[in-house]
Amino acid sequence: MKKKEIRKVLVVNSGSSSLKYQLFDMRREERLAKGLVERIGCGGPANHAEALEKVVADLGDAAKDIDAVGHRVLHGAEEFADSVVVTKSVMAKLDRLVKFGPLHMPANLGGIKACERIFKGVPNVAVFDTAFHQTMPDCAAMYAIDPKYYKKYGIRKYGFHGTSHKFITMEAAKFLKKPLSKVNLVTCHLGNGSSLAAVKNGECVDTTMGLTPLAGLVMGTRCGDIDAAAVLSIMETEKKTPAEMDTLLNKKSGLLALAGSSDCRDICSKAEKGDKAAELALEMLAYRTALYIGAYNTVVGGADAIVMTGGIGENSTEVRERIVSRLGALGIKLDKAANKKRGITAVISSKGSKIPVVVLPTNEELMIARDAARLLG
Ligand code: AMP
């Protein structure tokens, strides 16, 4: 493909019933517009093509001269270890990956197909939530079950939030003034969905999510790690189908099940008022996060920094305090005054800490736009 200057990049995140977009001027990485179309297929636009027509109408003149469209795509499996310019053969491969995300992938691909039609001749770039984690060694990525399930169906750990982990890895390297290829980190994306990544020499070597985004930390509505036999036991005793169990573990567990709300702010204010269930939920969340930080610090051979991001990581002073207070064995101490900062880059560990804890705001949309510009420009 001929390279050209990529100035204007539209970033599209097509979900099953919504479409989020941001428009960037990449000369200064400046955001020109952002918006959301909701209720696709349920009262609003009939499909993603109609939703994009609405985006074009909303953008008006700004929709002219778009040089590239970057798309968030849930799953690249082992096919895609990096973002990719969408061609016919890429599209055929993506169609074969729908089984890895039957809920999200059709919507993601619908967004790409709609852009191909609406922005004729404008290249589309697919950016995968899984790609950053493709550098994981087999010892981290494989499950200890009969390898035929990997060979036949691709059952292994893939990891998600890769775009965010990659973005904060790059930002952390800049912040620490280290070359990307030499930086060791534990990156913590803590939001409604949460995951940690172990980053060695700038590359992911382990992450807490698995085949799907269910594994790992305690999340808003997902249980995270659980003994698979406990799942079987509930299914058998309550005669639940796999689909019902999927809903239970993904949508009705985590903070929601433990303390009645999936929103961390609600849980914090309940705990402050003495609600014991909320208190336990926060301790479980902090405990498991600290557990993995300790493990991943070992995995990377000693981290240059622990990095926190996402809605909770960037903003929740309460949760950050609960996590960092469990990291004493790593020689880390919280700077209580610095930890009051919200939503901005800040070192929240005390000066004498052996490993700094750094809060860095993530920007997945900008990362997608950067990848589109990198591949085409
Ligand atoms: P995300 O999925 O990254 O948007 O993060 C959503 C989570 O961040 C929710 O659990 C929110 O309660 C939490 N969050 C967002 N803003 C704040 C804040 N100012 N203080 C505490 N938690 C926050």
Image: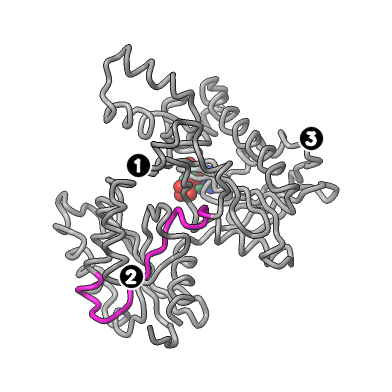
Q: Earlier in the sequence, mark 1 or mark 2?
A: 2
Q: Give x and y (percent) for residue 77.
A: 40, 52
Real-space CA distance between mark 3 and mark 1, rounded to the nearest whole angstrom? 41 Å
Magenta span: 115-134
Real-space CA distance between mark 1 and mark 2, rounded to the nearest whole angstrom? 24 Å
Q: Which residue is mark 3?
A: 329
The amino acid type of the residue labelled 1 equals Tyr
- In the displayed orientation, state which residue is furthest to the right: 352
Disc number at residue 153? 1
Residue 125 forms part of the magenta stretch: yes
Real-space CA distance between mark 3 and mark 2, rounded to the nearest whole angstrom? 47 Å
- Helix, strand or loop for disc 3: helix
Disc number at residue 10? none
Q: Which residue is mark 2?
A: 86
**Would you say the residues marked 1 and 2 are in contact, meaning their CB atoms lie under 8 Å apart?**
no
Q: Give x and y (percent) for residue 354.
A: 82, 47
Q: Is residue 147 left or right of residue 183?
A: left
- Helix, strand or loop for disc 1: helix
Q: Residue at x 43, y 83 (%)?
A: 7
Q: Within 10 Å of the Cα at label 1, are there few (<14), some (14-19), or many (20+) other Cα atoms?
A: few
Is residue 225 visible in this depiction of the protein? Answer: yes
Q: Nearer the viewer, residue 171 or 344?
A: 171
Q: Residue at x 42, y 60 (%)?
A: 80
Q: Residue at x 47, y 42 (%)?
A: 157
Q: Within 10 Å of the Cα at label 3, are there few (<14), some (14-19), or many (20+) other Cα atoms?
A: few
